[in-house]
Amino acid sequence: MAHAKDITKDDHPTSSRATTQLSKIRKALPLRVLSDADFAHWQRRGFVIVRDAVPMENVERLKALLWEFEEKDPNYPATWDVTQRRDYALKEINNAGMVEIYNHQFLWDNRMARRVYDAFVDIWDMEDLWVAIDRANLNTPNKGRRASPGFIHWDADTSLEPKPISVQG
């Protein structure tokens, strides 16, 4: 097993073991969360919607945490239009709602939720998965100082052959 300090995005412990493109996996494990139609959609289209992935109470407490962390109030739009705290090197993500919160327990509770784990088991067809972390996002209406033209965001370089084997959720 790789040491955490040695892991890059391209050699993530789950994806670096994978040798079969995810669209070509032939299931060995039974589906846990996805239906046969969901799995076929995933393989054909490259995305799938997992309904009720985390309990609604988790959603509500994480929403409250993000508003508090950003020092904004969901009931007072005047608190939404504030100068962002950090100017990103990638200018296209300025004002894109990125929240620099990574390891709060509420995020881990969602990452480790049984339906989330089982959906990834369905997709990868393996049980020994390695969680990757990312920040959260809180998007208020795109106006005022938050006005942003948006941008196309790819988490994998699709010009590569073979395609990178990776999943984000």
Image (tube, rainbow, N blue to C red):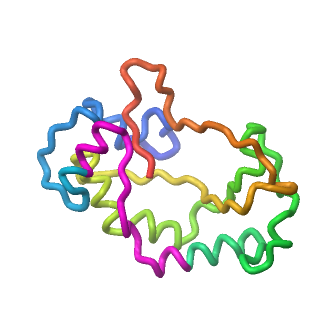
Residue 1 appears anywhere in the view? no
Question: Is 104 inside the magenta-drawn segment?
Answer: no
Task: Using residue 63 as the reference point, say whether residue 166 is left or right of it.
Answer: left
Residue 116 appears anywhere in the view? yes
Q: In this picture, is 113 found above or below 17? A: below
Residue 92 position in % (x across, y down): 74, 39
Residue 36 position in % (x across, y down): 18, 51
Residue 167 position in % (x across, y down): 40, 43
Of 95 and 105, the residue lying toward us? 95
Residue shown at 44% from the left, 52% from the top: 169
Residue 62 position in % (x across, y down): 57, 73
- Which stretch appears magenta? 38-60
Of 45 and 121, the residue lying toward us? 45
Of 107 and 75, the residue lying toward us? 75
Residue shown at 52% from the left, 43% from the top: 5
Which picture quadrant has residue 64? bottom right
Q: In this picture, is 132 found above or below 55? A: above
Residue shown at 21% from the left, 37% from the top: 25
Question: Is 45 inside the magenta-drawn segment?
Answer: yes
Task: Using residue 36 as the reference point, say whether residue 91 is left or right of it.
Answer: right
Quarter of the image with the N terminus in it: top left
Q: In this picture, is 3 found above or below 120? A: above
Task: Using residue 119 as the reference point, say whether residue 92 is left or right of it.
Answer: right
Which picture quadrant has residue 114? bottom left
Q: How many marks?
A: 0
